Each structure stands twice: as C-alpha cells, then as structure tokens.
Amino acid sequence: MSTILISGGTVVNATGTMRADVLVYEEKIVALLEPGNSSLGAITADKVIDATGKYVIPGGIDAHTHFSLPFGGTQASDDFDTGTRAAAWGGTTSVIDFAVQKYGERVEDGLATWHGMAGGEAHIDYGFHQIIGGVDEESLKAMETLVDEGITSYKLFMAYPGVFYSDDAQILRAMQKARELGLLTMMHAENGPAIDVLAAQLAESGKTAPYYHGIARAWQMEEEATHRAIMLSDLTEAPLYIVHMSAKQAVEQVAWARDKGKNVFGETCPQYLYLSLEKQLGAKSAEWGDFEGAKWVCSTPLRSEEEGHLEAMWQGLRTNDLQMVSTDHCPFCMKDQKELGRDDFRAIPNGIGSVEHRVDLLYQGVVDGRISLPRWVELIATTPARMFGLYGKKGVIQPGADADIVVYDPQGHTSIGVGEGRTHHMNMDHSAWEGFEIDGHVDVTISRGRVLVEDGQYHGAKGHGQFLKRDLTQYLV
Ligand code: DUC
Ligand code: ZN
Ligand code: ZN
Ligand code: ZN
C-alpha cells in the first residue's frame, strides 16, 4: 500500500493547465486536490514529491519504436531492457513497438517473438503494432486475430523491396481487411522501387557517401507515396496514419486529404524538426566522402532546411495537419553496425535513436515559442493515447488514470553528450543529438505509481513494464 502526493506543481493536460496537488494511490491517480489543502485533513502520503515551480504532466507515450529490429544484416542496438530504461530517463512511460512478421513467417510467430523479447524485460508499459511483411491469404486471415490480442494498428511499407515491401495490390487488400476489422493502417510512405533505382545509379557513379542516402530518397518519392496511400485509403475507407513524415510536400498531401474530410493522420519525428541534410549529413560530406554522416542516416531521410522542410513540420504541428510526434527509435552503433555501409551508403542500417529525448526536444519547442504548453502535452502523451486506444488509462492526469507521471523542471537543463561524459542511456556509441542543449529537465518519472527516476537516480527495474492491450483508435466515429 503506498500513496504519493505530488505537491505544489502546475498540472498540464492537453486541455490546459491548473495548479493542483496530485494524489497517487498504488498504481492510479486518485485525486487532484486544491494546492496546499492536501496536507490538511485525513491525507498523509507515504511519500511527498515537491513540484513547486514545476510541471506535472502525463508520462510520454512514444508510439513508434523498434527495439531489437533486425535490419540491414544487423539488429537495432537497444532491446526492451535498455530501450525502455532510456525512455524512462527521458520521461516516457509507454512505448508502442513494432512486432515484425518477416517474409515467409507467420504473423502469429512474429508477434510471439516480440512478446518473448519484451516480457520480463521492459521497464515501462508497452504495446505493439503489427508489421505485415507479406500480405497474402494467410496474413490477411491472421489480421483477424489482432484486435483480440490488443493490437489495433498494423504497418505496411511502400519502401524496402525485398525486405518489408507491399505493392499496391497488397496494400489495397490489407486496407480492405483493416476497414472490416477497425484496424488503423500505418504506412511507411516512400516509393521504394524508384528509390532503389536512384540509389543504385548514385552508388554506381561513385557517390557512395552517407549524404547520398538523402539524395536518393528524394521528397518526390515521399510525396508520391503519401498521395498513393491516401487514395487507396479513400477508396477502401480505411483510416490511414502516415509514419515519420519529413517532406513538406507530403505534409501538404495530408493537409489536403484532411481538408477533404478524409481520415488521414500524420506523424513526424524529432529528427525532422531539428536535424537537416545540410547540417548533419553535410554537403561537404559528399565531397569528402566523410562517413560521420552515417549517424544521421534514417528513412525517411533528413531533408533540406533551406527548402523549408523543417519549418513545414513545425507548422504542421501547430496547425494540426500533423497530429503526432514519435521517435522511430531505431538505434545502431557506428562500430560494426553503421560501419557496414562505409563503402556504400545503401548498406548503412537506417535509423536514429531518440527515445530518451523526445519529451525534452518537444519542450524546447515550447521554449522557442513554436508550440504551446498544452500542445506539448497533447503531442507527447495525449494524442498518442487517443490515436492508439490507450486514452483514459494513459495520456492524461486525472483520477482513474494510471499514475504515469513526469515532474518536469522548466528551470532545469539537459545537455546531451556522449563518450566519457555520456549523458544518455541508450545503447549506442554515439548520439544523433550530441551537443543539443535543452532548456528543461525531466526530474521525476513515475510509472504506475512506481518512481523510476528521481534526483538523477534510477530506481526502475526490468519486468515492471506490462503489455498494453489497446482499444481501437479513438479518432474515428
Ligand atoms: N526507417 C528507419 O530509419 N529505420 C528503420 C525502418 C525505417 O523505416
Ligand atoms: Zn518506416
Ligand atoms: Zn519505424
Ligand atoms: Zn532538474
């Protein structure tokens, strides 16, 4: 039996802010109390957390992670243990990871593998989306079991021929099935076959540096695929969620679809808000063949700041043309992993690790005047909860909700470093975010009433995290 009182803070929900003390009993939030009064009367908490001058917010929900993803002949370097621990350090208390059905494998077996990897390992609660790697009679049939398993969204890839790719006929059939079942279709929208031709042409002409990864994956390839996915979704009346958007023109497609009343949603990631083709991959790295740029090889790729892509992502978040910010956390070390592509960018495993930094990086958007405080909470917690069937239990500070709570210090500071003075906890030998300074700090992270992070100390443990059986998306009537 344990009660925690979080006193003196400002509670921030997506709906607004209020001064209130938050009372936690065991795993749940049980009351929001008038500030100061909670020390009176009958309530004596086992533990009091002083949140004076700080924000009390729902724990972050990162709806797009890839722990232990097999990719490019290697495997993402964070597993459910290291990855969810790093998430907790950064104020994220739930993740939704992608269970993978590989070509030739049964959907059920892919899902069982993911349960096996996460069970007993996760430090925070976790759910799964299902990647359908091969749409055929068998996998379409298997989709029928997903809702009962608490998996209410699945993902297809228009990229990566030979790996995860679905062609238009497969997408159409999967969407028809999704419509029937109420599943949300998540789409990696890039024209993979055309990209692969461009990439081969670049590599064959000696353009093998990491920089050319971003050139091959041109914005036209994202715009085209996004439009195609929207039209297939329109035809089948299956709601559509486009993952990791980075091209301005692709966001315009989503905005157009939404203005027409279509059920289309867009997600971007911190890397597309802050990191650019020029600065991180670097025009110079193309001339020099500098391999440093491999740290920022991800798909969709980082895009040109000069062409306005980064600004368009922020604008989309402000205007709600984009609803979600997830990380697409897919970490690979430089040593033995990214290095696989030293001679050819096509062999660099795609991905950036950010699961620890999303809450902070988005808070910087508040400091910089790009989004409001409640919008911050909406983006990091509330919309992910509503989008993926967790709302009420997660994503809000209110009585009855899980006590997934972050005390955030707006006077605090977070420096992201690597090496000797390493300040991140992801299992990576570098950070795509090295040198970033955040004008805020995650002081306390609580997951279902258990304090995981406090005073710079870690108190969590693997096995605390539970599997989240999710409801259908709450974004549809
Ligand atoms: N993009 C990445 O950056 N990594 C893994 C898969 C993907 O689509
Ligand atoms: Zn993807
Ligand atoms: Zn992804
Ligand atoms: Zn602090």
Image (cartoon, rainbow, N blue to C red):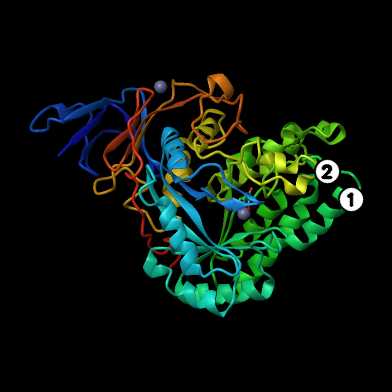
Q: Who's the residue at 39% across and 45% down the image? A: 122
User: Residue at coordinates 53% horizontally, 67% vertically from top-left?
Assistant: 239
**Residue 249 in the image: above or below residue 286:** below
Mark 2 → mark 1, Cα distance in angstroms? 8 Å
Instruction: Tell whether 418 sits left or right of 340.
Output: left
- Extreme residue toward the bottom, this view: 137
Local packing at callout 1 (Cα closer than 10 Å; few below 14, some 14-19, many 20+) is: few
The amino acid type of the residue labelled 1 equals Glu
- Residue 453 position, x and y percent, is 36, 30
Say which quadrant the N terminus sits in: top left
* Dot 2 crowding, Cα within 10 Å, few <14, some 14–19, many 20+: many
**Mark 1 CB lies closer than 8 A to ligand 1:** no
Q: Which element carries disc 1, helix, strand or loop?
A: helix
> In the displayed structure, would residue 84 be above or below residue 150?
above
The residue beneath circle 2 is 208
Residue ranking furthest to the left: 42
User: In the rendered view, would you say 165 is above or below 24?
Assistant: below
Residue 430: % across, % down? 61, 31
Residue tagged by mark 1? 204
